[in-house]
Image: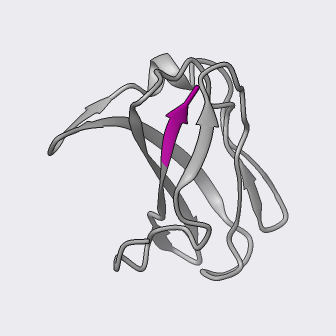
Amino acid sequence: MSDDIREIAEGLQLQGANEVIAYRLTTTPWGSSPTVPAVKVYTIVGTAYTDVTTTVMPTGTPSVTGDVITWPALKLLTIGVDYFVLMEFTISGNVFSPWAIVRCRR
């Protein structure tokens, strides 16, 4: 895990190339009643980040139930590539941007 406090507590996530996963985030560490959820997904190659959201999260929108945000399903990943998933939501007028790394495996 990095020293960036915005990285999700669970750290690195592993996902198979054929898997389709709708990740969830509980916002209680930041507060309750999140609104305006959004997400962007980037590939990481060296120090370059490339937005691939429309490719790997092509359908759906984030949904909120209580303090849990469910993101659109992450899919169509490439084996051996790391993905930087930047989540964003608002609580009490504050905008938070936690993130996670998803590593695609076979």
Q: Is residue 53 above or below residue 14?
A: above
- State the residue at coordinates (73%, 38%): 22
Q: Is residue 11 above or below residue 38?
A: below
- State the residue at coordinates (71%, 79%): 28
The quadrant the C terminus occupies is: top right
Give the percent coordinates (x, y) of residue 53.
45, 28
Q: Does residue 89 belong to the magenta stretch?
A: no
Q: Is residue 45 above or below residue 77?
A: below
In the image, taking residue 50 as reference, residue 38 lies left or right, namely right
Q: Which color scheme did the rendering employ for the protein? A: one colour
Give the percent coordinates (x, y) of residue 73.
69, 31
Count how many numbered circles sit on residues in the image: 0
In the image, taking residue 60 as reference, residue 38 lies left or right, namely left
- State the residue at coordinates (47%, 24%): 79
Q: Does residue 103 belong to the magenta stretch?
A: yes
Q: For residue 44, what is the image quadrant?
A: top left
Give the percent coordinates (x, y) of residue 14.
59, 45
In the image, taking residue 101 as reference, residue 64 lies left or right, namely right
Residue closer to the observer: 79 or 75 = 79
Q: Which residues are magenta?
A: 102-106
Residue closer to the observer: 7 or 86 = 7
Q: Main secondary structure of the magenta part?
A: strand
Q: Residue furthest right?
A: 65
Q: Residue furthest left?
A: 47
- State the residue at coordinates (59%, 53%): 36
Q: For residue 61, what is the image quadrant?
A: top right
The quadrant the N terminus occupies is: bottom left
Q: Residue furthest front?
A: 106
Give the percent coordinates (x, y) of residue 69.
72, 55
